[in-house]
Amino acid sequence: MLSQIALGVILSCLILLTVCGNVLVCLAVCATRRLRSVTNCFIVSLAITDLLLGALVLPFSTLIEVTGDWPLGAHFCNVYISMDVMLSTASILNLLAISIDRYIAVTVPLRYPTLVLPWHVGTSLAVIWLVSIGVSFVPIHLGWNTVDQTVQNHGKDDPAGDCRFELNPTYVVVDSVATFYLPLVAMCWTYYRVFRIARAQAKRILSIHRAYSSTTMSSLSGASALALREHKAAVRLAVVLGAFVVCWFPYFTFFTIMGIRKETDLPRTAYSVVMWLGYVNSTLNPFLYAALNREFRSAYCRLLCGWRGINTPTGTPTTALEAGLLNGLTPSSSRTEFIPGACIMLQDMSNGNRDGSNGTSLSIISVLSNGHNRS
């Protein structure tokens, strides 16, 4: 009894954190005009998806874990399982859309405003939800996911107090490949490309900084600050992708194996562990995707504490890799960070008559790496 209470408290805290974190993302966008951009539609869509998962699915999952029983009938059981599959799938596909958005912003920055239009984003979101419904409500309510092609939990031999998710090989292979393994490969490739391109930009910025620095000590100081922030951004990029893999890979591996083996009664403990590990990704998303952005952090502070925001020190501008990592979260008005040559030329022309070369260097770095002249 005591263990059930402890489990209920822990899972309830996880639900509360999931709901509050994603509500905070939505409020930050609503309350901050600079965050109301086409790019952030994917972040809001992700937050709404994870919010619905936390509010509509996780309480019933907690009920099953704590009581070990399903008292709400077979029909609502299938609705609950369908919502679980749909929202989990939509969350994963939203993460894929964010990675593609960042890849486009880094690889073709000059064409980004013409490629990522409002109707393109709307179409992408519609596809995400159509695919999510197509692998959840449709097959589960038509019996396509079961071995004998009958609707699960409605058979005469199915226990009345049980809520089972039945699987067959065809369903698990199609579902896992379309909604996890292919998105995983795509995310790894896009983030790898973002990393490579941004590192090349960082080396260019560093060489410009060394060329324009007036003293050796200034060059070393700027290089050290740039290298430190570059390292932090690389770690964040690894955390974003690593959290996705750690949270979802065990579930889909277990899911696929059980389906291929035609297991009608899934091992309860193992299934609960991998399922809740996947749920944790929805808890982490507000922190991994929104809190990494300076504008979101400032909005969080204003909402929670009334602070005016957090400013990056002018001596240590955001690096190219950090800008690439957060590019999908940056308002479209500041998408000038990856215009090599053009930014340098314009900045040189505007600062050509200033006294001292170091100020010009820092301005160039600031424009290239963050899209704002904070020098």
Image (spheres, rainbow, N blue to C red):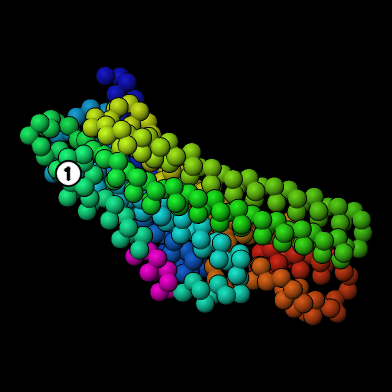
> In the rendered structure, does residue 123 fall within the stretch colored magenta?
yes
Task: Name the foreground residue: 286 vs 28.
Answer: 286
> In the rendered structure, does residue 233 fall within the stretch colored magenta?
no
For image coordinates 22% across by 50% down, the residue present is 139
| Res 374 quadrant in image | bottom right
| Res 280 quadrant in image | top left
Provide residue 300's location: percent of width, then percent of height. 50, 54
Q: Which residue lies furthest to the right in this view?
A: 215
For image coordinates 33% across by 26% down, the residue present is 269
Please state if 347 lies on the left or on the right of 73 as rendered.
Answer: right
For image coordinates 60% across by 53% down, the residue present is 192
| Res 160 quadrant in image | top left
Callout 1 crowding tier (Cα within 10 Å): few <14, some 14–19, many ≥20:
some
Is 96 above or below relative to 126?
above
Provide residue 96's location: percent of width, then percent of height. 46, 55
Asked whether residue 109 is in view, the answer is: yes
Look at the image and tell me in which quarter the N terminus lies. top left
Provide residue 15's location: percent of width, then percent of height. 35, 40
Q: Give the range drawn in magenta.
A: 118-126
Q: Residue furthest left?
A: 156
Provide residue 37's location: percent of width, then percent of height. 48, 69
Please state if 81 lies on the left or on the right of 315 as rendered.
Answer: left
Amino acid beneath label 1: Gln
At numbered mark 1, what does the secondary structure look like: helix, strand or loop? loop
Magenta portion: prevailing SS class: helix
Task: Name the foreground residue: 84 vs 357.
Answer: 84
For image coordinates 75% across by 64% down, the residue present is 365
Please state if 156 lies on the left or on the right of 234 as rendered.
Answer: left
Asked whether residue 27 is in view, the answer is: no
Task: Name the foreground residue: 183 vs 50.
Answer: 183
Q: Name the residue under label 1.
A: 149
Look at the image and tell me in which quarter the C terminus lies. bottom right
